[in-house]
Amino acid sequence: MTGSPADAAGTAGTADTADTARTAVMELQALLGRARRLDRHLTRLMTVDEGAEPLEDSVVRPLSEALAHLGGEDDGRGAEPEPGTPGERLWRLAVDATRLRTLPGLPTGVQEATAALQHLAWLFTEDPEIRAARVAELREIQSALTPEIRVAADGPYLVTNPSRITDWLGEPIPALPQTALCRCGASAMKPLCDGSHARVGFSGDKDPLRVPDERESHQGVQVTVLDNRGLCAHSGFCTDRLATVFRQGREPFVAPSGGRMDEIVRAVRACPSGALGYAIDGREPADQPREMAVEVSRDGPYRVTGGIPLTGDDGRPEPRDAGASAEHYSLCRCGQSRNKPFCSGMHHYVGFTDPPLPENPTLYEWAGGLPALTRMTQIFYEKYVPQDPLLAPLFSRMSPDHPERVAAWLCETFGGPKLYTERYGGYQHMIAEHAGKALTEEWRARWAQLIARAADDAGLPSDAEFRAAFVSYVEWGSRIAVENSQPGATPPPRMPVPRWWWVCSATPGSRVSALAPVTEEPSADLPAPGEPLGFTAHIRPLFRETDRRSMSSAFDLWSHTDVTRHAEAILGRLRQGDMPCDAPWPSDRVDVFARWIAEGTPE
């Protein structure tokens, strides 16, 4: 009996699927063999820990798991020798893995291995032009794939065709067409995945003791605030900036009539997790569209904006909590969230930290980079300027991106990337913006006063050192702007954007704060009477880290050369008791330092 056309079509479709699966298995087997052979070759060439294999965790393991998932056999052997350098072989592997990754229905292990191979091929390509061309080729291969973030089961976040990934300073992280972001918190190359989740036994399950998924409604006079505590990432954007409405440690958490409607709306829109929402007259407005982007926040979660689709290991949409926004959400990065894959704020409690700032950070780094400065300028121009009778008329015709332009200027001025120069034309363009406006001292003073308030609202650092530098630049820069704006002014042409620094070298850590917790640093062991003295063994340990930082503008107390050069001056201050600044040395320490000088300041 002959089947119907529909039966014939179904049979053909099944056969096509089977053929695709067989092809995928064969290509996986070949890819896995080549990866194993290259891994062994790199192990012999590279300086790695004993027993370590550079591709084992990030490439070989996920490919092997994907092959097993498809029912293919893994003989554990490597492929035949391939010609070319390790970099050339990595590039060919990356291209072939990327082509395989475009096939539908493959296990997520293929994406994970592809991400690792693309990154390794990028690292091994030193020439910038060749690197750019190769990235473009990979993008073209997978250009038909929809951007998404796929949550691999007990594995990383697999980001396909990301538009932009930035660090907490707003600086771009190389975003390859297939990127694997660490989810377990154990990667040695955070934020990228290095396969550590398999070694540490990471589980992506939700904790049954998580904060319940319940969305509460708090009706106020002008606006109703919607809040799901189970989705909160505890970033503090609401409690730090509108504490009269969002009351930390009090119940109910939300007091919807404790602030102006525009302030509440601004705070809700700033919520990176999507836990907060609002309604006016019973209607929730749509989220404001933004560029697809992933921000790696400092010591915290991935903050996703732009409605990047979030899918599970099977490719289906990841289940969301009640009221959760699809436009923005926060993903756990420490591996300890109780609401995986979403952040629950556990990074605060498990001590999850990124590498510290450099010893002498720029003002840009200390402020929090471009995101923090943009927050400040947006608050300034959205909140303070419109309600001020002096400034509102002055800025009534400003361009929509004016807050971003000012943030880019401050970013560059405070020691960050040259964004204003690259995007807007540098110092000459800023001069043109002010030319002929005849700004007054009254306008300038109000601008300086309100930008400081916006800095408070935006959560910029409030330590004395940063605010001294911040205010000094605001005063200096605003007065220069007034000067340049006067009729007939002739500002010097072709000047660079100014670069500002800490005031009088008052850098973070240069003093002991009166509010700092009292900590005891390890005490230095004094030499025995008659014991030969040396700088490394006996003198350097006498100076604490805080002593070193406080004198860093003049010389380095941990440098034999510097201390030898200034030895007599240091001894004089030690004997007077005004060094260190918090307490004089005991006489036996001073005697050791004096004896070291008498013995010729030996190293």
Image (cartoon, rainbow, N blue to C red):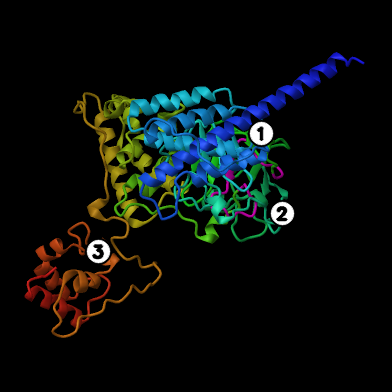
Residue type at mark 1: give it.
Pro
Residue at 7%, 71% in the rendered image: 600
SS of the residue under disc 1: loop
Q: Where residue 545 appears, x then y in whole percent?
A: 29, 65
The residue pinned by badge 2 equals: 212
Q: Where residue 371 appears, x then y in whole percent?
A: 44, 41
Residue type at mark 2: give it.
Pro
Q: CA distance from mark 3 to mark 2?
A: 49 Å
Labels 1 and 2: the sequence-earlier one: 2
Res. 343 visible in picture = yes
Give the vertical position of 342 relative to 531 (above or below): above
Labels 3 and 2: the sequence-earlier one: 2
Residue at 68%, 25% in the rendered image: 19
The residue pinned by badge 1 equals: 285
Residue type at mark 3: give it.
Arg
Residue nearer the viewer, 588 or 113 = 113
Residue nearer the viewer, 100 or 557 = 100
Asked if residue 580 lies left or right of residue 74, the reply is left
Res. 383 visible in picture = no
Contact between labelled residues 2 and 3, with CB atoms less than 8 Å apart: no
Labels 3 and 1: the sequence-earlier one: 1
Residue at 25%, 63% in the rendered image: 548
For mark 2, does the 10 Å Cα neighbourhood hold few (<14), some (14 to 19), or many (20 or more) residues? few
Q: Where residue 48 appears, x then y in whole percent?
A: 39, 51
State the predominant SS element of the stretch in magenta.
loop
Judged by depth in the image, the label closer to the viewer, 1 or 2, is: 2
The residue pinned by badge 3 equals: 548
Q: CA distance from mark 1 to mark 2?
A: 25 Å
Asked if residue 382 lies left or right of residue 540, the reply is right
Which residue range is magenta in the image? 321-342
- Say which quadrant the C terminus sits in: bottom left
